[in-house]
Image (cartoon, grey):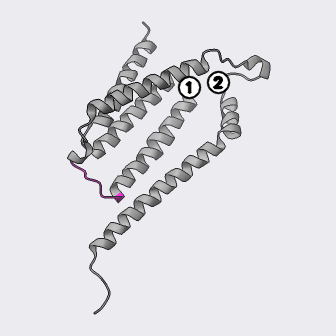
């Protein structure tokens, strides 16, 4: 076993462990911070696979933007910072069963979908993994999904602000005179 394989296994264990902590912790802020650890370790896996662009996109977009937006939304909505018993519905076994079943179905679907698929890069004249090819694919095929995601994140931020404003207005006494 090489050092790269050992590091990949170690980072994979960190990803799985921190992802498990994301969904099992009773602290909302701790869950967001464990998500940072999980996404950062996943970026490390991408680096070990020589996918530097994907690793930096992972860090910049997910760790740098999505998690910050999540924490900002938690602060605006005055989510409980300490342990919260409201986060546990008591259906852990059912949720674990549904998660395992969903992962199994998705795994079977992915294997069946890409089992016989191949991309002939030599016929198209493209070189696999170059920054130019990845950039061309992103800006040609994936611009609309990125823009839709940005609008969705903006809507979530506006929704968090609206929710926090409603609480402020409900706490203030009426300004209407007698």
Q: Residue at x 32, y 70 (%)?
A: 168
Element under label 2? loop
Q: How many marks?
A: 2
**Quadrant of the frame with the N terminus:** top left
Q: Is residue 7 left or right of residue 148?
A: left
Image location of residue 84, percent across then percent down: 22, 47
**Above or below 86: residue 133:** above
**Above or below 147: residue 121:** above
The residue that disc 1 covers is: 51
**Is 52 in front, or is 9?**
9
Q: Is residue 53 magenta?
A: no
**Above or below 27: residue 124:** above
Q: Which residues are magenta?
A: 76-82
**Is 134 in front, or is 24?**
24
Q: Residues within 10 Å of mark 2 (few under 14, many from 20)?
A: few
Measure how far apart labels 2 and 1 are at the Cα level: 8 Å
The residue that disc 2 covers is: 129
Q: Which quadrant holds residue 116?
A: top right
Mark 2 and mark 1 residues within 8 Å of each other at the beta carbon: yes
Residue 2 in view in this figure: yes
Q: Earlier in the sequence, mark 2 or mark 1?
A: 1
Element under label 1? loop
Q: Is residue 79 magenta?
A: yes
Q: Is residue 120 left or right of residue 39?
A: right
Residue 49 in view in this figure: no
Query: Residue 138, labelled with which disc?
Result: none
**Above or below 136: residue 129:** above
Image location of residue 79, percent across then percent down: 29, 54
Q: Which quadrant holds residue 125?
A: top right
């Amino acid at each position: 076993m090489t050092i790269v394989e050992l590091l990949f296994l170690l980072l994979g264990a960190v990803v799985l462990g921190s992802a498990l902590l994301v969904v099992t912790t009773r602290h909302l802020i701790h869950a967001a911070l464990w998500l940072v650890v999980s996404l950062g370790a996943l970026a490390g896996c991408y680096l070990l696979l020589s996918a530097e662009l994907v690793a930096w996109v992972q860090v910049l977009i997910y760790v740098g933007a999505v998690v910050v937006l999540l924490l900002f939304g938690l602060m605006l909505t005055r989510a409980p910072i300490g342990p919260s018993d409201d986060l546990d519905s008591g259906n852990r076994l059912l949720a674990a069963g549904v998660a395992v079943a969903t992962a199994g179905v998705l795994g079977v679907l992915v294997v069946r979908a890409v089992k016989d698929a191949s991309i002939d890069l030599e016929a198209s004249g493209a070189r696999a993994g170059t920054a130019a090819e990845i950039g061309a694919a992103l800006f040609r095929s994936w611009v609309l999904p990125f823009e839709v995601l940005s609008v969705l994140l903006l809507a979530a931020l506006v929704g968090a602000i609206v929710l926090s404003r409603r609480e402020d207005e409900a706490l203030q006494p009426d300004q209407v005179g007698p």
